[in-house]
Amino acid sequence: MKIADHQVADRSAFCTTRQAAERIGVSHRTVQMWVENGSLQAWKTAGGHRRITVASVDALLEKRRQSLSGSAPAITPKFTQTPSQPSSAEAARRSVLIVDDDAMLLRLYELEISTWGMDLAVRKASNGIDALVRIGEARPDLLVSDVHMPGLDGLGMIRSLRSNPITAGMPLLVISGLDQPTVRAMGLPDDVPYFTKPASLAALRAAVTSALPPAAAATGPALS
């Protein structure tokens, strides 16, 4: 919906995409993607410029602050005994957790992995917070993640995992639309394999095969 600037009663309630990017600490393009997928609320002026609600920026920042500070329950995976445990056959299967805010890509990866004949249990998460919750429920044998995601992004998630002794050694792969030097400069550890989107499925399969532990050493459910 396009609205003329003079129709806005309180200009302080809105900001530009560039102002939002500077405030959040991400790229201008990331803010645009978050607007497009609904993570940030915005409208367009008559001239076609986005105006983002300050309230939605504050909400995203607060969610990230809670996640990174550990005040949100999802940020520190807790590995505890749960009432319902998987069967021995399920526990013996190796598992991969794929994290991406693009539902179509998640489905593509899931379908592709199902054709590899590796008997991998595929789990999915749409952002870093969701992924940490799933890791707390059951630690995967491999994590494959995007970088730019709403809430807690891939790099914040990796920092949280690396700071926890239980998950510090978890095998990781990162796939992003950004070039590798940019992502490394943003803080991606040098020992984490990186792929630029769209990643070659053949190369991805080789990387997954190399990163996974032997079947007998699969992590299985995470228990304390």
Image: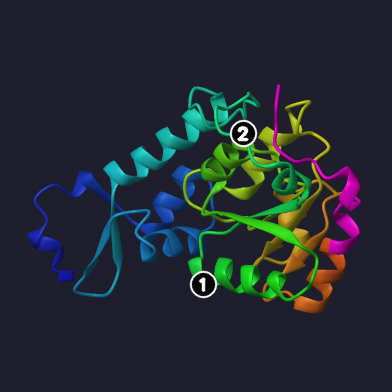
User: What is the x, y in percent for residue 180?
Assistant: 77, 63
Tell me which segment is drawn in magenta: 209-224
> Residue at image x 8%, y 51%?
9
Q: Is residue 161 above or below residue 92?
A: above
User: What is the x, y in percent for residue 25?
Assistant: 53, 45
> Residue at image x 80%, y 65%?
118
Query: The residue tagged with tag 1: helix, strand or loop?
Result: helix
Left or right: residue 126 versus residue 193 is left
Give the amino acid type for the residue marked by disc 2 in the picture. Answer: Gly
- Quick one: 138 or 57, which is closer to the camera? 138
> Residue at image x 90%, y 47%?
216
How many discs appear? 2
User: What is the x, y in percent for residue 140?
Assistant: 72, 45
Query: The residue tagged with tag 2: helix, strand or loop?
Result: helix
- Quick one: 42 or 64, which is closer to the camera? 64
Q: Mainly helix, strand or loop, the magenta region?
A: loop
Q: Earlier in the sequence, mark 2 or mark 1?
A: 1
Estimate how packed mark 2 is, as few (under 14), some (14 to 19) or many (20 or more) residues with alpha carbons within 10 Å.
many
Coloration of the structure image: rainbow
User: What is the x, y in percent for residue 29?
Assistant: 50, 64
Assess whether residue 31 is covered by the magenta stretch: no
Give the amino acid type for the residue marked by disc 1 in the picture. Answer: Met
- Quick one: 82 or 54, which is closer to the camera? 82
- Quick one: 25 or 5, which is closer to the camera? 25
Instruction: Name the residue tied to disc 1.
Output: 104
Locate the N terminus and report the quarter of the image it occupies: bottom left
Which mark, residue 136?
2
Locate the C terminus and report the quarter of the image it occupies: top right
Of badges 2 and 1, nearer the viewer stands: 2
Which mark, residue 125?
none
Q: Is residue 124 above or below residue 103?
A: above
* Residue 49 occupies quadrant: bottom left
